[in-house]
Structure formats: C-alpha cells, structure tokens
C-alpha cells in the first residue's frame, strides 16, 4: 500500500505532515526519510520513503510493519512464495538507443506541466490500487537468480540478442543517488552548478542545496566522441557563463571518489543538456554564428 502524505516525527517528538513529492527538496531530507510514521491517529506503523524513479516518489508501509486494525490504511497481507535473492555475476553494456530513451523520458517528466503531472500521478494511483500487498513466505528458502549489472563501459559486453537489458535506476535529483548505485550505470538529472574543462577531461558539478555530485567526462568519453567534441563542450560552458540555466541528464557508471558519489559518463550519447544532445545544444545556442 502506498501513500502521498505521512507524518515526520523529529527527535523532540514534534510532528509534521510531509508530502512524497516534496521531501527530496528539503534540506533535512536524510533525517526526515528515517523518521516517518503513519498519519492516522493512534497507528504506530513506520513508513518507508521510495524515491522517484520510473514512477513518482511515494511512501509505503515499512516491511513487516502492520497498521492497527482501526487505521484507514490497514490491510491484510497476502502470503506469496519465497523471495528471490539476486546475485550480480557480470556487467552488461547498455545500448545507446536504450540510454537515449531513458533520458528522453526523464526530461519529459522533469519538464511536464502541473496538469500533465496530475494526470500521470492519477494513472499511477489507479494502477497501484489494483495491486495486492503480499508478504514473503519466510519458511521457504529464497530462490537465487543471477543478473548482470548495467554498465556504460567499453569493457562490458552487450546482452545477447533477444535478452532484456538490465534495469537502470532513475534518479531525478542528486539526493536520491545511493551507495547501492556504486558499480552500476545509473540515470541522473540535475542542474549544473559549475563546469570545468581541460585537455580530454570535463567535470560537471551538479548541486541541490548543500549537496554536490560531480559528473566526469574522461578518456573513454573523448575516445568515442566527435572529433570536435571539445568545441561543443566549450559552447556549453560559454552558455553557462552567460547565465543559461543548464539541466544535465546523463547515464553513467557510479563511483566513489574522495568519499563522494560521482558518475563517469563514457559516451557522447549518454549525456543531454536541457534535453538535447550536446552537439544539437551547441548548434541551437550558436545558431547561424556557429
């Protein structure tokens, strides 16, 4: 069962109603998401925050936590078969077309109007109502399946023809980037706060309030990019210096450098500026002067 509004209870015992769509914008986001409770008076159920991905951000009942029978959110769990334990055995390289579709969809959601957003959320709520909540049968041993981690590195191989590509996590702001994303190709969209260019290297810093994540374009990116990729990057930097608000969308492999999470983008098709490929953005910005 999912919810849009729950109670945040701080260390002083003070309570505040919080909304799933707004929680990631809060400066105390990390504290809030660990102290959420059902909003029905007298119910002691803890609540889990699920970041926005392919669908909207939402709250759900904490695993194995039950609402009181008087609570409006009370439900009976339906037992299901043993859980599935996933083991990553290798990395699978993502197709450029797959990455392009992911970024296209993320920019569409990021730029949607209030009316479009309400319509999308309404459809998602109607769909979620049809899903029954199930609980794992812990008397059975979990099934083990092997899967491939999504990757953009040239060292990884594409999946076999007819095989479904691995799932790519979508992070609609840097607060949702997690330690669990390390070693996997992850999609991220956020505003650029600075750009640093050097020979065969570029760093886009993305910032949201007091949190910052770097996106690195390094040797592999330049080896597979257009011969004039440096010119395109210089035009993007020129636009930024001139006050253009730049939203960066990318799919990159997540690493940890100097104690901070970051993304390594390995292909030109894996990066979009304001919803456009980097070459298209450069042409549109410069116009006839290019």
Image: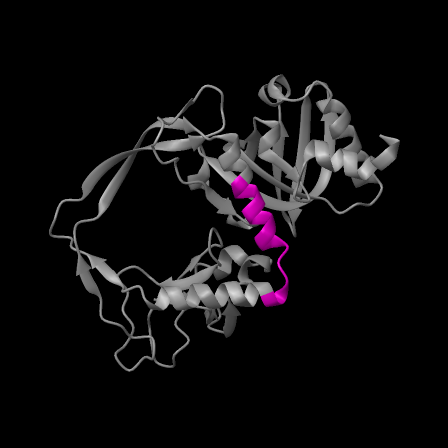
Q: How many marks?
A: 0
Residue 247 in the image: state x and y as whole percent: 68, 45
Q: In this view, does 208 lie above or below 158?
A: below
* Residue at 82% from the left image edge and 45% from the top image edge: 243
Of 165 and 212, nearer the camera is 165
Instruction: Identify the image quadrant of the N terminus.
Output: bottom left
Q: In this view, does 276 lie to the left or right of 148?
A: right
Of 7 and 22, nearer the camera is 22
Q: Does the magenta stretch include residue 111?
A: yes
**The magenta stretch spans which residues?**
101-115
Q: Is residue 255 left or right of residue 44?
A: right
Q: In this view, does 39 lie to the left or right of 75?
A: right
Residue 278 in the image: state x and y as whole percent: 69, 33
Residue 42 in the image: state x and y as whole percent: 34, 80
Instruction: Tell which residue pokes out farthest to the left in this image.
Output: 139
Say whether residue 258 is visible.
no
> In the picture, residue 163 is in which quadrant?
top left
Q: Is residue 9 above or below residue 153?
A: below
* Residue at 69% from the left image edge and 44% from the top image edge: 274
* Residue at 52% from the left image edge and 34% from the top image edge: 97
Q: In this view, does 114 lie above or below 251?
A: below
Colour treatment of the image: one colour
Q: Is the magenta stretch mostly helix, strand or loop?
A: helix
Q: Is residue 249 magenta?
A: no
Instruction: Identify the image quadrant of the C terminus.
Output: top right
Q: In this view, does 246 lie above or below 286?
A: below
Of 207 and 21, nearer the camera is 21
Instruction: Tell which residue pokes out farthest to the right in this image.
Output: 289
Say whether residue 45 is visible.
yes
């Amino acid at each position: 069962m999912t919810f849009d509004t729950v109670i945040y209870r701080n260390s002083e015992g003070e309570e505040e109603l919080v909304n799933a769509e707004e929680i990631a914008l809060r400066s105390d986001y990390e504290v809030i998401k660990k102290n959420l409770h059902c909003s029905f008076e007298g119910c002691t159920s803890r609540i889990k925050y699920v970041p926005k991905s392919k669908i909207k951000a939402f709250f759900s009942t904490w695993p194995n936590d039950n609402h009181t029978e008087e609570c409006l959110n009370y439900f009976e769990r339906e037992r299901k078969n043993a859980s599935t334990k996933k083991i990553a055995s290798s990395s699978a390289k993502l197709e450029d077309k797959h990455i392009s579709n992911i970024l296209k969809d993320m920019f569409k959601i990021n730029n949607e109007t209030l009316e479009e957003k309400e319509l999308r959320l309404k459809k998602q709520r109607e769909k979620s109502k049809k899903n029954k909540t199930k609980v794992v049968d812990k008397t059975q041993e979990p099934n083990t399946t092997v899967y491939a981690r999504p990757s953009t590195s040239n060292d990884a191989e594409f999946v076999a023809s007819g095989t479904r590509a691995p799932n790519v996590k979508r992070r609609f702001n840097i607060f949702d980037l997690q330690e669990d994303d390390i070693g996997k190709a992850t999609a991220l969209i956020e505003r650029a706060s600075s750009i640093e260019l050097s020979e065969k290297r570029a760093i886009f810093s993305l910032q949201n309030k007091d949190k910052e994540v770097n996106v690195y374009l390094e040797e592999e990116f330049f080896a597979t990019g257009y011969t004039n990729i440096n010119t395109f990057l210089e035009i993007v930097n020129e636009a930024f210096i001139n006050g253009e608000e730049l939203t960066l969308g990318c799919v990159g492999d997540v690493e940890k450098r100097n104690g901070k999470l970051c993304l390594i983008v390995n292909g030109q098709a894996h990066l979009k500026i304001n919803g456009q490929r980097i070459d298209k953005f450069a042409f549109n910005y410069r116009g006839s002067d290019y």
